[in-house]
Amino acid sequence: MSDTEPPESAASSLRTPIVAVLGHVDHGKTSLLDKVRGSAVIEGEAGAITQHIGATAVPLDVISGIAGDLVDPDDFDLPGLLFIDTPGHHSFTTLRSRGGALADIAILVVDVNDGFQPQTEEAIEILAQSQTPFIVAANKVDTVPGWNAEENAPIQKSLERQSDRVRGDVDEKLYEIIGQLSDKGFSADMYWRVQDFQNNVGVVPVSAMTGEGVPDLLTVMMGLSQRYMKEEMAIDVSGPGVGTVLEVKEEKGFGSTIDVVLYDGVVEEDDTIVVGSSGDPIVTDVRALLKPRPLAEIRTESRFEKVDRLKAASGIKIAAPDLDRAMSGAPVRVVRDREIDEVVEEVQAELADIAVDAEEQGLVVKADTLGSLEAMANALGEAEIPIVRAEVGDVAPRDVSVASTAEDSLHEAILAFNVDVLSDARKQAESDDVRIFQSDVIYRLIEEYEEFVEEREQAQQEAVLENITRPSRFQILPDHTFRQNDPAVVGVEILAGTLQNNTNVVDFEGKEPERIGQLKGIQKDGDDVDEARKGDRVSIAIDGPTVGRQIEEGDELWTELHEKHAKILEQELVDDIPPDERDALQMYLDKHRRRDPFWGK
Ligand code: GDP
């Protein structure tokens, strides 16, 4: 048996379940993975845990060694657990398979002190969407003040060692997490009280620092897979391999290579494979199957050594011609004894499955992998933000062109998840006024875009307001006629609203509102101004009337509002204008509506 292969057990046709670790940044995902690997080495079984490309296999005997009394190896016939080395929902969404998520089970890491955080929520949504069973590792229990640690102990044993006060504090924190899970629609409890892990989420208190609870975590994962996933783990040991591209890399001495997680069947050195790409699927012949060289030998030559055959579940690097076009998250299928066309069709069908449905109008979305593109599309769908184009790859000038031709200026934006913006695309975006949002956290992209929408909407309203005549009511002051006519110049006080220059003036003295002239200048304290506000006393020049005939000192006059403007003011901008102006508007509308109840409606 080559040590790249999961250990053969009585049921060698059962594959190793694939485990992903998710959670908020700094909650301890990496530490927990390191601890699991570390504990396995400490167990003295270092030879038995194997490093794959992008994954670590922990075989059943190592798990039972760590778990001690918690596990009886005879209860299990799955060969162990394969942990994906890169934690976080990014790799989780990248690593997808036919059915959805590639990972069979997940560990959601939650810091007991921090509880649920944005990325915890995001991870939960992704897990729910992909229907991946998961357990919660309530991490960092050792940080509860007064904690009395016992390295690598099962958690119940550890809890018994604590004072009543510490146990009470731990319980309180755990119940908070259980409550937060239930707010998200998951019935959850301490793992030792959960009977049915299919319908309940088990919470395992752990410390990635002291290793406490790690035996429980491994036991629960193993039990969960054995109980509920055995059927899915049954594979055709000699069947053609099926996997997912984790990464596309140039590798010295090998050219372009793909890191693949194989989840079904076998891949061999002389196989022909079909790999998904942004264009037509790539059909190519394997040149080398590579696994990491053990650490001790690494200085000798290449970091990799060749193997001739590998079976699922495992992580492998494949070197072959034309792989530079391969795409992260895309399917890989071994052809062996079948028609190439048939396999190409299968790969195409899988890619089509993942394609995002675009709409006529919406945003441009770019992401680094198919899986992350899909996760973005789901999150945007939930936020009811439409997508016009969704593609894997860096932001290019043509993406900017698409965004810049959006009918709605709120769609003149590109959301770039974990990809670069090409420099000519950046320049074009600046000149076309297209906004590019870049992040490796989905919720942040959406939040930033929503802020942008709010900003733009506000700017639009302000622009509208600028082009609309504002209501005002003003009165000619006694003894303030400076010129009789041509134009008439009088002193006025603004009673309400904003008086703007170059607007028409009306009065409501007669039955019909009557336009009496046009404002040709406003002076305040001897200076020319464009407008005057409520309470101001200014002198104004009105072209048209003669004082003593059409107008008199003491008259109340109004700025004339176009019916359309009055309507926009009342229906859309009423919250954006000051209260006195609102009053003036209302009075103005009332005066018109006494004559015509539908004026301005
Ligand atoms: P990640 O971002 O989720 O991968 O988090 P890390 O594994 O990098 O951990 C973030 C920080 O928390 C590091 O400083 C760790 O040493 C610390 N940390 C992680 N787990 C524990 C734990 O169980 N107890 C304590 N005391 N610290 C922890």
Image (spheres, helix red, strand yellow):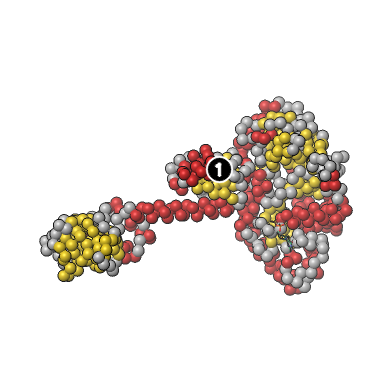
Residue at the disc numbered 1: 423
Report whether the residue tagged 1 is closer than 8 Å to ligand 1: no
* Left or right: residue 564 compared with residue 198: left
Residue 291 falls in image quadrant: top right
The residue lying at 44 percent from left, 45 percent from top is 408
Q: The residue tagged with tag 1: helix, strand or loop?
A: helix
The residue lying at 66 percent from left, 56 percent from top is 25
Report x, y in % for residue 124.
64, 53
Q: Quick check: can you spot residue 71? A: no
Question: Viewer-proximal residue, 201 or 361?
Answer: 361
The residue lying at 57 percent from left, 42 percent from top is 422
Q: Farthest residue to the front: give it.
A: 526
* Left or right: residue 445 compared with residue 186: left
Identity, as a three-letter code, of the amino acid under mark 1: Ser
Report x, y in % for residue 427.
51, 43
Q: Farthest residue to the left: give it.
A: 549
Report x, y in % for residue 383.
53, 51
Which quadrant, please, contains the N terminus? Answer: top right
59 is higher (above) or lower (below) than 547: above
Question: Viewer-proximal residue, 176 or 402?
Answer: 402
* Left or right: residue 167 compared with residue 120: right
Badge 1 crowding class, 10 Å Cα cut-off, few under 14, some 14 to 19, many 20 or more, is: few
Q: Quick check: can you spot residue 85? A: yes
Ligand 1 position by quadrant? bottom right
97 is higher (above) or lower (below) than 339: below
Question: Viewer-proximal residue, 122 or 9?
Answer: 122
Report x, y in % for residue 514.
18, 56
527 is higher (above) or lower (below) than 11: below
The residue lying at 59 percent from left, 45 percent from top is 420
Q: How many marks?
A: 1
